Image (cartoon, helix red, strand yellow):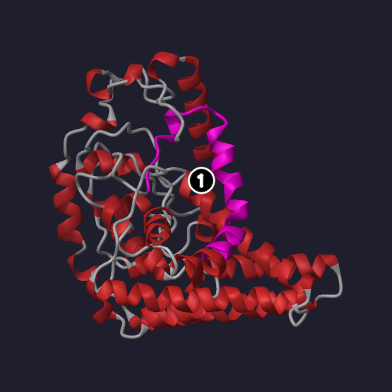
Amino acid sequence: MNSSLLSADDLPGNPDAGSGKIPLARHPDDAAMIRAAAELTRDLTTARPEIYWPDFLACTITGYGALALAIMATSTAAMLGWAVLAMLTLYRAGLFIHELTHIRPTALPGFRFAWNALVGVPLLVPSFMYEGVHSLHHARTRYGTNEDPEYLPLALMKPWTVPLFVLVAVLGPVAVLLRFAVLSPLSLLSKSLRRTIVERYSSLSINPDFRRRMPEGAFRRMWIAQEAAASLWAITVIALVATGVIPLHAFLIALGVHSGVVVVNQFRTLVAHLWANEGEVMSVTGQYLDSVNVPPPGFLPALWAPVGLRYHALHHLLPGLPYHALGEAHRRLVKALPESSNYHEASYDGLPGLVFRLVKSTFHASANPATETPAPR
């Protein structure tokens, strides 16, 4: 399907069918919205260490403390309660990886090292797996195209792709454990294996066609240091479990908490965008409208989309704003822009409605084979 030749009525699963609205891939830029976003938020661009550090450290300490209590719990109910708390707080701490890709290192000295030492390496998601990748998702001519590592036209795929997208996340912790404990050491013996690992197994991406370039310069040195630390950690954990130093039940509880973190993040990813673009280059406004804000008053989005990610559409409009400024930026724009502005079109009520919308779109796509986008290879 070439959406550049379609009206809104032709888009599979499009809730605006019959409304005459312009398809996202053809949407012209809303100059007034873009200008207002830049002008009204000039004073909000500074990352504030007094917010970043306490937030991150409190979540990290609470997360590991709750994990320890879950392991030591004497009842199933207590174990599950502490495990849920550990999952939610470590999830929030982990999502600071997103901030690392957008803030200047000089804005928060030592934050990248601390994040990797306390969360990235222990959870086997060192920041090199996201840095240098996520920026491609924000590139003006890459978003929503085949060159976007973080985009799939899920709304136009078969219905089974949505549950599969979530289910594969359950095995995420096992996958990264094997990646760092087995593949990293083996890659030292084979250049071809090393290239394959770098291209296909070294990025937090969802596009199966994405191939990462070999790192260079200072970033390569940082990559090697982080990968070596993660590899040593993974090998140590496996050895300690195998020898009984770490009890099997403790390892399985930690693995379950880690899996919960990945699954919740996968659900968040599932509703971060509308996933309705088929590979065409989109305008800034089109990209904004293909993204999702879930603003207050709802409380639950603060749990499943923390660290500012409940304002994901606004983040795509202003990727340089630190997470703690997005709420104020949203309030200013809602107040300043008229109801006719495209800005208001990217706000939604919550997770259930967004998931239903996406699943409904896949059924529409399947019912119209002529416009169906094939599932990923």
Residue 7 lies in the magenta stretch = no
Seen at 73% across and 66% down, the residue is 252
In the image: residue 252, left or right of residue 317? right
Towards the viewer: 233 or 104:
233
Q: What residue is disc 1 on?
A: 350
Give coordinates of residue 350: x percent, y percent.
51, 45
Q: Could you say where residue 330 lies in the image, as x and y percent from the top left?
A: 32, 56
Q: Which residues are magenta?
A: 150-179
Query: In the image, is 257 to the left or to the right of 101?
Result: right
Residue 55 visible, this angle? no
Main SS class of the magenta portion in the image: helix
Q: Is residue 106 visible?
A: yes
- Residue 127 percent coordinates (x, y): 40, 69
The foreground one among 47 and 232 is 232
| Residue 119, horizontal then vertical, whole percent | 51, 75
- Residue 69 higher or lower than 257, as above or below: below
Quadrant in the picture for residue 223 = bottom left
Residue, x 34% and y 70% (percent of image)?
A: 100
Callout 1 secondary element: loop
User: Closer to the camera, 256 or 48?
Assistant: 256
Q: Quadrant of the C terminus?
A: top left
Quarter of the image with the N terminus in it: top left
